[in-house]
Amino acid sequence: MEPTAAAAQRIFKEFDSYDFANDQAFQQGIKSIPNHEDTQVQSKAKHFYYCRTRDEFDYEAYLQWKTEQSGGEQPDGVGEASMVPGAPYSAPFAEVVRKILNNEPFDDIRQIPEQLNENPPSVSTAKAPRKPWEQD
């Protein structure tokens, strides 16, 4: 059943004011999500968790409501994905990336042949060890 506009706004306001930072179950779960520092991932995770534990609502309708509330700008974590400038990669990592992108071979990686050794196995020359119950 689709909630009325007033009920949807009430749910949206409750969702906005919900204290996710102090909800231990949410904090435990968000840590298991790869890339959980991304604000868009956090926003979707909050929606998922809130719908499972509280009231269910349409995420797209919430985003539209949030945009209207903020005067046309998109809420945090929503919008075009962009590269976050961070620390530059180390030189060895950059070299690995360059080699992969240019399809260059790695010097220190040994090529292993696909077939097994074709030489006959060696014959054992050692005497079999005695069993504990065997006597001289």
Image: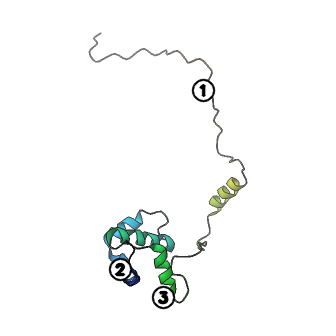
Tag 1's secondary structure? loop
In the image, taking residue 135 as reference, residue 64 lies left or right, namely right
Crowding at mark 2 (Cα within 10 Å: few <14, some 14-19, many 20+)? few
Element under disc 3: helix
Q: Of all residues shown, which one is farthest toward the top?
A: 136
Residue of label 2: 18
Foreground label between 3 and 2: 3
Nearer the observer, 130 or 50:
50
Which quarter of the figure has residue 53? Answer: bottom left
Type of colouring: rainbow
Task: Give the x, y percent position of residue 88.
Answer: 62, 69
Q: Quarter of the image containing the N terminus? A: bottom left
Earlier residue among tags 3 and 2:
2
Disc 1 packing (10 Å; few <14; some 14–19; many ≥20): few
The disc labelled 1 sits on which kind of residue? Leu
Front in this rendered view, residue 7 or 84: 7
Label 2: which secondary element:
loop
Near-viewer residue (111 or 132): 111
